[in-house]
Image (tube, rainbow, N blue to C red):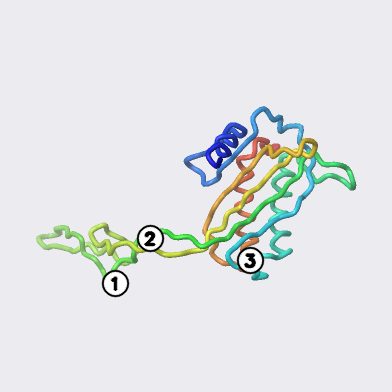
Amino acid sequence: MKATLTAALLLLFGVVSSCSSPVAVQQKPGVDFSRYRTYDWAKTEVKSANSQNPIYKSSLNDEIIQNTINTELAKRGIRPAAGTAKPDFYLTYHLYIEEAERTVANPPAAGYAFPYAVSYRGGYLPINYGYWYRSPFYNTGYRTETYNEGTMILDFIDARTHNLVWRGSMADPVGNPARIGEEFAKSAKDILEKFPVEEKK
């Protein structure tokens, strides 16, 4: 059943990805995105291992994220629907914050390294790389560390058919939970760089 559902989703969406960007995009084939001129916000979600923590559910964070998205869409001539007018599409995002693991290099050993010397006027001078240089000859190994990974999913839903027509997603480390609004706002901007409607010059 799961395999059948996955195959159906792949048939429904044309999956577009870029090796140079962490943004993943799914787009419904045959959609004319130039006809989407207005939108309205649908309910947003935040899911985390500690979802009861009010720091993850904040209207201030929503305001930061939505203002960024509003600005980016306005650059493309797409604006919120006026008054009670029905929008061309609904816009919503989902935020997930979860613990993940990654492998990182251990810091170099304390002290200066002298990997080689040069001759000068009949003598030898050791070349001091200093603390800033991490020579492969002084690799102190690797370790696994845990960190908080934040995933943003941005959905565009056709208001007439209620079909999901475009989805962009991105996962990045969340450095400071108190600033997740700003961090996810940056993710939203990166995602919208892949939106099929380009900025107007």
Query: Label 3 to label 2, Cα distance in Å?
Result: 28 Å
Q: Which residue is at the front of the view, 42 or 71? A: 42
Q: Position of residue 182 (x, y in %)?
A: 63, 60
Q: Residue at x 74, y 44 (%)?
A: 74
Is residue 195 shown above or below 49? above
Query: At numbered mark 3, what does the secondary structure look like: helix, strand or loop?
Result: loop
Q: Residue at x 29, y 62 (%)?
A: 141
Q: Position of residue 102 (x, y in %)?
A: 42, 59
151 relative to 136 in the view: left or right: right
Q: Position of residue 152 (x, y in %)?
A: 61, 52
Q: Residue at x 71, y 33 (%)?
A: 33
Query: At numbered mark 2, what does the secondary structure look like: helix, strand or loop?
Result: strand
Observer-side mark, 3 or 1, equals: 3
Amino acid type, residue under disc 1 in the picture: Ala
Q: Earlier in the sequence, mark 2 or mark 1?
A: 2
Observer-side mark, 3 or 2, equals: 3
Q: Earlier in the sequence, mark 3 or mark 1?
A: 3
Q: Which mark is residue 104?
A: 2
Query: At numbered mark 1, what does the secondary structure look like: helix, strand or loop?
Result: loop
Q: Quadrant of the C terminus?
A: top right
Is residue 44 shown above or below 8? below
Q: Quadrant of the N terminus?
A: top right
Q: Which mark is residue 110?
A: 1
Query: Label 3 to label 1, Cα distance in Å?
Result: 41 Å
Amino acid type, residue under disc 3 in the picture: Ser
- The residue identified by callout 3 is 51
